[in-house]
Image: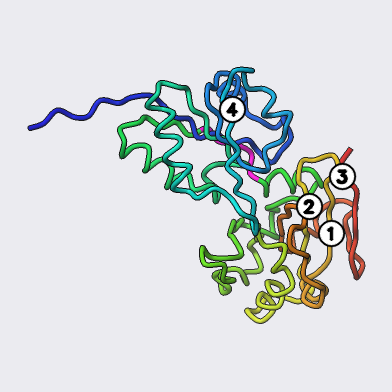
Amino acid sequence: MPPEPKTLFAVQLVGAGPGAADLLTLRAARAIEGAQALLYDALVGQDILAMAPQACLRIQTGKRAGRPSMRQETINRLMIRLARRGLRVVRLKGGDPSIFGRVGEEAQALRRHCLAVEVVPGVTAACAAAAQFGLPLTHRGVARRVVMTTATTQDGELSMDWAAAADPEATLAIYMGARAAPEIARRLIAAGRSPQTPLAIIHNASDPQARLELTTLAWQATAPAAPLGATPALILVGDVLSAADGLAAAGGLVGLAGAA
């Protein structure tokens, strides 16, 4: 029986959180500070990148919806090559690596090459966006569950479990769906969700210039689609949004400045 392959160098798949450096976990900060090679996504801020040592090799991997980015296979090969050279490799991903961050694909690729993998969690965009504007995701008697989903499939088609999304006791957190927001609203109404269900779009969550648009499914269903290249945004849908203090949307669109 052949000996088991030896584990080589560890690669850390690290969540950078929603953007603000002070929302990094301590473990994530230590990983960045000790990195010798840093492969980072496009939305990772400069203040976070500045935490890496001066001699650290920095490689921007793209990963911005609707824009050209490095192929996943190329990212995998880079991580493997750098780790085999003996470098401490940190793959820095926006939000939490396990929430639409391809952490499974990357971990599998690394382990196939006998590389140890550590996943370092981060604050995901839904939690950060809700907290910044005082929006609860669950609320006793109103919302019993949170559904995190993407608006589109790998092929770019609009695809969700519309029946599950129509559950009035579920808060929906929809990632990468800002451009499709009007069509999402129309399909949710068609699936049975009340047209008066509150809908929030949060732009640039955790940034001091973050912006909230609070409206309803009915209003959003008739709104124009966001332009290509618009700022990163997250959609929240659910009656729970009405429970936020001071955020009653008495018809139409409510725009709020970022949290102080």
Quick one: label 2 or label 1, which is nearer the N terminus? Answer: 2
Q: Where residue 28 sits in the image (x, y, percent)? A: 59, 27
Quick one: label 4 or label 3, which is nearer the N terminus? Answer: 4
How far apart marks 1 and 3 lie (CA) works out to 11 Å
Residue 24 in the image: above or below residue 198: above
Asked if labels 2 and 4 touch by Cβ distance under 8 angstroms, the answer is: no
Q: Main secondary structure of the magenta part?
A: loop
Q: On the image, numbered disc 1 is attached to which residue? A: 213
Q: Residue at x 67, y 38 (%)?
A: 44
Closer mark to the observer between disc 2 and disc 3? 2
Dot 1 crowding, Cα within 10 Å, few <14, some 14–19, many 20+: some
Asked if labels 3 and 1 touch by Cβ distance under 8 angstroms, the answer is: no
- Mark 2: amino acid: His
Quick one: label 1 or label 3, which is nearer the N terminus? Answer: 1
Q: Which residues are magenta?
A: 120-124
- Mark 4: amino acid: Ala
- Mark 3: amino acid: Gly
Q: On the image, numbered disc 2 is attached to which residue? A: 203
Q: Where residue 63 sits in the image (x, y, percent)? A: 60, 48
Q: On the image, numbered disc 4 is attached to which residue? A: 28
* Residue 175 in view, yes or no: no
**On-image quarter of the N terminus:** top left
Asked if labels 1 and 2 touch by Cβ distance under 8 angstroms, the answer is: yes
The quarter of the picture where residue 84 lies is: top left
Q: Residue at x 65, y 56 (%)?
A: 67
The quarter of the picture where residue 161 lies is: bottom right
Q: On the image, numbered disc 3 is attached to which residue? A: 258
**65 or 260, which lies in front?**
65
